[in-house]
Image (spheres, coloured by chain):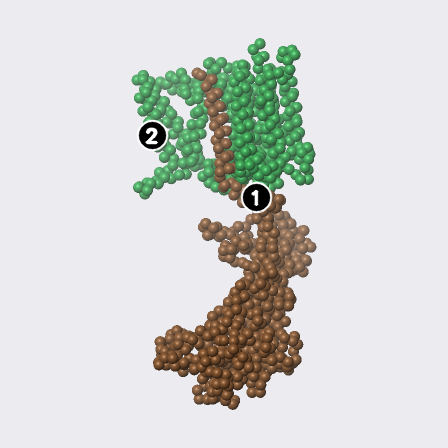
Chain colours: A green, B brown
Amino acid sequence: MRKGESIVAHFDWTLFVIYIILMIMGLSTVYSTAYNEDHPNFFDFSQKYGKQVIWVGFSLFLGLLVFLIDSDIYRKFSIPIYLFTLVLLVIVLFMPPVNGARAWLGIGTLGIQPAEFAKIGTALLLSRVISSVNIKQQTVKTVLLANSIILIPMALVLLQPDAGTFVVFTSFLFVMYREGITYDPIILKLLNGIPGFKFKETWVGTHFIPLLFVVVFLSLVTLLMSNEILTFDAFPDLQIAGFWVVMLSLSILAILIFLILRFMSSRRDRNRVVLIVIIGYILAAGLVSTVNFGFQGLAKHQKDRIELFLGLKEDPDGEDYNRNRAMAAVGSGGFLGKGYNKASVSSVESNHVPESETDFIFCPFAEEWGFLGTIILVFLYMFMLLRIIFIAERQRSSFNRIYAYSVAMILFYHFAINIGMNIGFAPVIGIPLPFFSYGGSSMMSFSMMMFILLKLDSQRREDLQ
Amino acid sequence: MNLDGRKYVIIIVTLLVGIIYSIRLFYMQVVDETWTLRAQEIAEKRKEITPPRGVLFDRNKKKIVSNRTYFNLMMKESEMKNFDTVAFAKLIGWTREEVRERFKEIVKGEGTYRNKHTGKRSSNYQKIRAYPFLKEMTLEEIATIAAHLEDFPGFYEEVTSMRSYPYANGANIVGYLSEVYREEIDEDPFYKPGNNMGRAGLERFYEKELRGRKGIKYIVTSALNNAIESYADGKYDTIAKQGPPLNLGIDIILQAYGEKLLANKRGCIVAIEPATGEILALVSAPTYDPNLFIGKRNISKNYPKLLLDPSKPLYPRPLAAEYPPGSTFKLLNSLIGLQEGVITPESGFPCNKSVVGCHNHPSAGNLADAIKHSCNPYFYAVTRRIIQQNKEKSVFVDAEIGLNLWAKYMHSFGLGQNLETDITGLRPGSIPDANYYDKWYGHHRWAFSTIRSISIGQGEVMLTPLQMANVAAIIANRGWYYTPHFVKSIGQDGPLEQFKKKHYSLVDAKHYSIIVEGMRRVVHEAGGTGRRAKLKDIIVCGKTGTVQNPHGEDHSVFVAFAPMYKPKIAIAVFIENAKGGGGLWAAPTAGLMIEKYLTRKIMEKDREKIILEANFSGIK
């Protein structure tokens, strides 16, 4: 730090202001939702809103501490920080379960959720590891290392079990994709072991995010079709299972791609084209078959959950209770909402929407502020995410950039899944809405994540020297 | 490899999610109503408050039907804790099995609803809803239980309102209430399971007025179905409004007295105030105590009993029983004869017993005396003149014209058709016309001689006691009537429109005086058939009737009004199977009724004693 220069000289006020606005909106929503007539005081610490005030205050204090520490610390100490969070994740597995999951460390309300902090540790170490890799010379070792950093906490989180955080960890895939991490070293090692194969690179290894979308899309289509049986008016005796329709479409698509590629490619490449299309077709068919028969083989209650999510089944008062109540709350908000403290479906008192001050806090907000409120909230999150990506892209150090992307993608996941489950677009997995939901661990971990980012960004120029 | 482009992939994915979510939110919150309706279904409950029903007053402002508070013992399964079946059974005085059975019944039967689309019924039982475990308990009954209810969480008492009858009279007039059926709930959204509805009498006819207006309270309820707060600060709530009181023309003292007089007899008394058409009393004997029909438990116990009773206490005789009017009918034939000009007050016909039987009396030289003696041959001759006016050569064609003319007159007296009074269960009686006899004998195959029994009110002529009383009222009014009705006013409003319209008979007012004079002679002159109706200071005008009954003893009939000038009461008394003519039983009964109504005292104690002791019920 240069002498005489303020600690906040290159502070990104824009991001900070959005962060503060979201936190205030969250606080007001928690107050409205958990409002208790006997304890009207906002600062009544026996109430959730009072506690949330403490969490916010404590988070800002943590933020100040983070800011007083030199940014270099986070890179240098990323390994101990990561290991520390891993140790916490292991310890938490020996704690008594709360609501069926061993996610809490500590007693009662004073507990923390190590899983929330593990995201920071993972983000820091991943940034350090990837920033030290020469992208052009990736080896099996580096790829495995980068992936292990993510997979270890994922495995530990799954043991709690905490499906929500488990899913959130896959956000690092986007970061790796952005940084050019490729699975080619592993794929090539396997593929080129087959006689006659001599690939230098594969599309699959480098473009795994688009591939991910293809896989998800194919799986969804297969699931949607797996219970269908198509009949034709012209041929009354003909019945085709949905699975075969998918397979048939896939075959036709493969033939088309094959013809196009063969027509366009040179004579020398033709054999390769045949090979690629055949391998691609086999993999796709394998995926469709696995999803289809895997789904058929699932236990009834598991099948039910998937069918509910896909909208193939309705059970508004049973299995689908949470999502149905949440959507009713959101949808009934109308354009202007029911007014502050007027939520009738999602207030804690009415209790129709469970966890309405934590994971489902979007419900009371949407119910009370209507579309006007929700569009502003979506806009604020969008603005925040794009701002972080913008910040990421202006970093000179790759460590900073990777960390910033990690933050952006973690927040993006939380935003997309949390709001998605309120509007029927995402399965109900409990993860908090960043800066908004009631809860100390999430508030503190997201704040720390944010302040580390702000700190790194404010010192970005020093990396030149 | 150009990694820089990949930041756009991420930006686009982020933006895409933001845009899709915005569109989705717009659709869910602004465009699509589904979720708003769903939210209402979930959290907003319409709570209906059923007001007490309107009460009924008699003409002297005596409350004859009022409301009384009863209690339901409610249960809510979700709040039940450590339920001790044995202790609970002991508390309410049941066996353990009975308690279990009742639970099963509630779970299976209570709160069933019909799916509007499929029409299928299914049990709507929910643990978080309250259902009545015991219904309609009196204060005394609930008091012993209520003290121990705190040992049984999930059970509590709820107030409900039911009828009470300060006088045990007029059951056939007021009717009774019972719980609505599922079909009725489906038909009229006003009713909810457990609501009551008027089943007979005035309770049924004035159901829409008496039930009042339900109060609707919109409340926000929690997932456990507990009320949290009123919705929108009660902006949309409406207050329950009790139905307006019905002020009846009934004199409950007279009604009670009439019921007393007809004890141990089958028959009717109908009394009407001629000037207004208000029904003063409508006695149907045998009758029943309206208190037997309070609440589900009483009804299910007593209704089958009364329904199967061979004396038919539930049958509304004054409205529905169609009797031949007997000699009382001679009054009408006289009036028509006068109007048609086929007789004059001075017309005399010999008592020629060869055409039709008669008792021994001097031949009547004028109409008034003929009425006094109730001379059958005289009225045979009168009616013959009406029917056979010799307008046509053919006696058959002549009779056809004559009978239709006669029937037209009769209809103008409210006969042969429903008197549209404010009670259900009316029958029209029967006034035969040409079509009627054509069906029996064939077209132009009958003449007066064939149908002569109509001249003395026998044969095909049928009247209900209400119609008979109305005839008395028409004569008392000298030619007109208001449709008889029970309700003088509904709250502040007067009677229904149809009761404000005067109906005129086709007989001019001037012809009535001689008939009235004849009726006076019936009661007040020596040789009159109805002298037992005579009162000391009041001139009673009446006419006896003895209805021949092929199945048993003759029926005793008397129609009358009093006083002669400015009549206050018109009355018809019909006593079935009375051993003796109209003069013997019906006339004194009518006299006592008139005395009771006009003086509130009974001077003729001996007469009263005889009537009270008479027993024609067939049961000694």
Residue B543 in sight: no
Q: Is residue B620 above or below residue B424?
A: below
Residue at 38%, 29% (x, y): give it: A285
Q: Which quadrant of the figure contains the C terminus of chain A?
A: top right
- Residue B11 seen in the figure: yes
Horizontal side of B425 relative to A66 (left or right) equals left
User: Which subunit holds the residue at mark 1?
Assistant: B
Give the residue displayed 34% in from the left and 20% down from the top. Answer: A272
Pointer 2 and pointer 1 on the same chain: no
**Marks 2 and 1 in Cβ contact (< 8 Å):** no
Q: Please give left or right for residue B511 compared with residue A350 in the image.
A: left
Residue identifier under label 2 = A252
Mark 1 crowd level (few <14, some 14–19, many ≥20, 10 Å Cα): many
Rendered residue at 40%/39% (across/down): A228
Q: Chain of mark 2?
A: A
Query: In x, y percent, where is residue B260?
Result: 61, 74
Task: Identify the amino acid type marked 1.
Answer: Ala
Q: Is residue A169 above or below residue B233?
A: above
Q: Which mark is on residue B43?
A: 1
Foreground: B464 or A265?
A: B464
* Quarter containing the N terminus of chain A: top right
Distance between the alpha carbons at the discs numbered 2 and 1: 51 Å
* Dot in front, 2 or 1: 1
- Residue B257 image position (x, y, % from top left): 62, 74
Name the kind of residue labelled 2 in the image. Answer: Ile
- Residue B428 image label: none
> Could you tell me which residue is drawn at 37 percent across and 75 percent down?
B438
